[in-house]
Image (tube, rainbow, N blue to C red):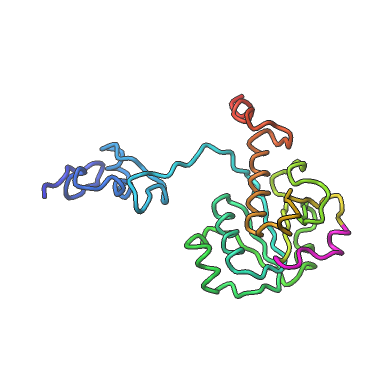
Amino acid sequence: MSRLPEVSGCSIWGGLSSLPSFLHHKLPACLATRYSAPLMKKNEQMRHSERKRVELDFQWPEVPFNIVLVEPSIPPNTGNISRLCAATGTKLHLVEPLGFDLSEKRLRRAGLDYWESVNLTTYPDLDAFFVQNPESRKFFFSTAGKQSFHEVDYRPGDYLIFGNEAVGLPDELLAAHPENVCNIPIKLDCVRSLNLSNCAAIVLYEALRQLNCGNSAKCPIGEEYEIRST
């Protein structure tokens, strides 16, 4: 193959035309600049398609939100939530005892290869969690809550706390914070509750939506982009 000329001390064998488009981002930075090769994010190119993933313009909080799982027992739920946290830069807190080992295959499989991007903290019990996080605002999610999750004005750094899949959060914990207990609307004639990982995703993205909408729980979605552009 012919050799490309050196550019700022860089050189490479072969022509750019011989490289698949999804490999262009692996070129040295000097060549990428010289030949206007597209620089791509790590997960931008789909593995089984020529399509590329699009990272939307979005205001991520400088101080991340926190998801707290109290004594979770089903590995795939925690694995899915870990992926959610990696995708949003959210911190994950696990309060023991856990119903699984953190090295368990089902847990790792649900989180795929995203665990390295998760900011994870574990605690031996709830008392330890509150001792280490005494000042931050905390919201507790339960089917016993009387206010809807979207009525809260969330702020960066808030702790969003969810209970065990079978029994939820302890009664005494909810009784101690009645003004901060929130619920997600469901039809009780049909189901008792939503899946834990679904609840975490619903609440977290509502908090993120508010942040992108002037931090207002009552901001109409249609006005979001107008507010952000001002």
Residue 161 part of the magenta-drawn span: no
- Image coords of residue 17 (percent x, y): 20, 43
Membership of 170 in magenta stretch: yes
Q: Position of residue 1 (x, y in %)?
A: 11, 50
Is 186 or 121 nearer to us in this picture?
186
User: Which residue occupies 86% across, 55% down?
Assistant: 177
Pick whichever, 9 or 175, lies toward us: 175
Report the number of numbered marks. 0
Q: Residue at x 74, y 48 (%)?
A: 185
Above or below, 108 against 177 in this view is below
The answer to whether 46 appears left or right of 132 in the picture is left
Residue 86 is left or right of residue 34, and the answer is right
The picture places residue 65, in percent across and down from the top left corner, at 67, 50
The quadrant in which residue 230 appears is top right
Q: Which residues are magenta?
A: 165-176
Residue toward you, 63 or 199 = 199
Determine the residue located farthest toward the left in the rendered image. Answer: 1
**Residue depicted at x 65% and y 49%:** 202
- Horizontal side of 101 relative to 130 (left or right) equals left
In-front residue for pair 35/45: 45
Residue 94 image point, x, y percent: 67, 65
Residue under the image location 70 percent in, 59 percent down: 68
